[in-house]
Amino acid sequence: MTDEGKPSPSDAELIERCLQKDNSAWELIVGRYKRKVFHIGYKFTGRHDDAEDLTQEIFLKVFRSLEKFNRDADFSTWLSSVARNFCIDHYRASKREKEVLVEDLVAFDLAPASTGSSPHRALEDRDRRSFLRRGLEALPDKLREAVVLRDLQGLSYQEMADRLGLPEGTVKSRINRGREELSRLLLRAQQAERGRSGGRIPARR
């Protein structure tokens, strides 16, 4: 019920008003379903801040897709489907971006320093190496050790197991956890850097 004691407008009514450029109607839709969308986002991310960001992006996508909504369908069901599909696509893209970012930075760190490069290129090289080092330093000791031994020093699983006195399964688990945490830290630092400079981390050339 509304404050005036009148029945709350239906989803169909609000959608029709939204299509007529009624911003207040859209605010009512968001208020009605924000918690529902947030919970879907949180199930995929497990992080409050990330779920909040996803919620905003999902509602933006829904707003842009309202004209495509079948008025005979249930809006709540359609909204949930859009939210889940968006989260799945976001997860896949984010996972691949993390893999590429870590692979690129690790490969760069293993590469020999270029000779005869310009002062500007040398500065970029130093910045990129510093970027990776900061990410590694932020990892818990056990995870950092696993990533360094595997990805930077190139030890095999068996060699790591022997050195650390651990089963291979534990070694593999630490490597995967370390890579995941490192990629999260690097992406967060990269996004912060973009926000400050309005640009990107120098691309590998």
Image (cartoon, helix red, strand yellow):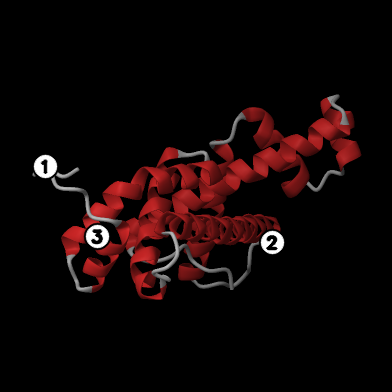
Question: Seen in the image, is 8 located left or right of residue 56?
Answer: left
| Percent coordinates x, y for residue 98 in the rendering | 60, 55
Q: Nearer the viewer, mark 3 or mark 2?
A: 3
Amino acid tagged 1: Asp
Residue 26 - label: 3
In this view, the residue farthest toward the left is: 4
Question: Seen in the image, is 167 located left or right of residue 138?
Answer: right
Amino acid tagged 3: Trp
- The residue lying at 66 percent from left, 39 percent from top is 178
Distance (Cα) linking label 1 and label 2: 69 Å
| Pointer 1 local density, CA inside 10 Å: few below 14, some 14–19, many at least 20 | few
Q: Tag 3 or tag 1, which sits nearer the N-term?
A: 1
- The residue lying at 39 percent from left, 51 percent from top is 55
Q: Decide: marks 3, 2 in contact (CB < 8 A)?
A: no
| Percent coordinates x, y for residue 107 in the rendering | 69, 59
Residue 112 - label: 2
In this view, the residue in front, 84 or 135, is 84
Q: Is residue 137 above or below residue 192?
A: above
In this view, the residue farthest toward the top is: 165
Question: Seen in the image, is 94 located left or right of residue 41?
Answer: right
- Which image quadrant is residue 145 in? top right
Q: Is residue 112 above or below residue 205?
A: above
Amino acid tagged 2: Pro
| Percent coordinates x, y for residue 49 in the rendering | 40, 42
Q: Which residue is mark 1?
A: 3
Q: Is residue 188 above or below residue 172?
A: below
| Percent coordinates x, y for residue 94 in the rendering | 56, 57
| Pointer 3 local density, CA inside 10 Å: few below 14, some 14–19, many at least 20 | some
Q: Nearer the viewer, mark 1 or mark 3?
A: 1
Distance (Cα) linking label 1 and label 3: 18 Å
| Pointer 2 local density, CA inside 10 Å: few below 14, some 14–19, many at least 20 | few
Q: Decide: marks 1, 3 in contact (CB < 8 A)?
A: no
